[in-house]
Amino acid sequence: MPLEPTPFNRLPGGARLDRAWIESHIPHRGRMCLLDEVLSWDAVRIRCRATSHRLTDNPLRANGRLGAACGVEYAAQAMAVHGAIMAHIAGTTARAGLLTSVRSLVLRVTHLDDLEADLIASAERLAGDDEGTLYEFTVSGGGRELLSGRAGIVFGAEVT
C-alpha cells in the first residue's frame, strides 16, 4: 500500500519531526546535527529547514566562512532523516548510510553563511534497494536555488 503524502512535519500518530526527533534518529549529534525540522515528506521526497548556516560556531566553517559545498551535508542529513522516517513507518531501524558519491553538483553561490534566509534542504529518492540508494537534492534559501546535485548512499549497519 503506497504511503500517502503528508504536507506536515509530523509522523502518523502525531510525533513532531523537530530537531530533537532528527537528532535521535540520525548519527549526527550536537552542533553536527544541522537541521531544525522537517517541513514535509512523503515516500520519495523530503524538505527540511535549517538555520545553523548562520551560526559562527557551525562545525563546517573554515576560515570563518561556510562554503557552498557544505550544503551537500545539509542535503545528506535530509536524506538520512528521510531514511529514518521510512524505517519508522515500516517498523524497523534505519541503517547507517555512507555518502559515496556526489554527481552533477552545481554551486550557484560561493558561501552559505551570508544568507539571511533559512536553508531548505530537499531530496527526492530516485532509485534504491537494500544495498544503497540514489537521491537528487537541492538546497535553497531566500527563494532561490543555491546548489543541486545527486548523491549515492551505500548502507551499512543499523543505527542504534
Image (tube, helix red, strand yellow):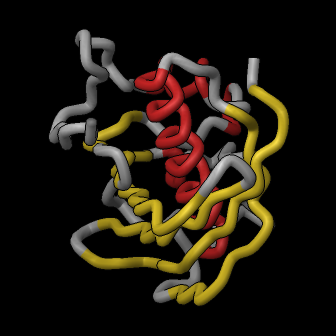
In this view, the residue farthest toward the front is 1
Residue 140 versus residue 40: which sits nearer the camera?
A: 40
Left/right placement of residue 9 relative to residue 63 reads left
Quadrant position of residue 76: bottom right
Number of numbered discs on residues: 0
Q: Residue at x 47, y 68 (%)?
A: 126
Residue 64 versus residue 25: which sits nearer the camera?
A: 25
State the quadrant of the C terminus: top right
Q: Residue at x 72, y 31 (%)?
A: 27
Residue 106 versus residue 159: which sits nearer the camera?
A: 159
Residue 9 versus residue 129: which sits nearer the camera?
A: 129
Residue 14's place in the image compared with 128, above or below, is above
Where residue 155 appears, as percent x and y from the top left, is 76, 47
In this view, the residue farthest toward the right is 157
Residue 122's place in the image compared with 67, above or below, is above
Quadrant position of residue 149: bottom right
Where residue 37 appears, as percent x and y from the top left, is 38, 34
Where residue 54 appears, as percent x and y from the top left, is 50, 52
Where residue 18 appears, as percent x and y from the top left, is 39, 25
State the quadrant of the N terminus: top left
Left/right placement of residue 124 relative to residue 8 reads right
Q: Residue at x 65, y 65 (%)?
A: 70
Left/right placement of residue 82 relative to residue 15 reads right
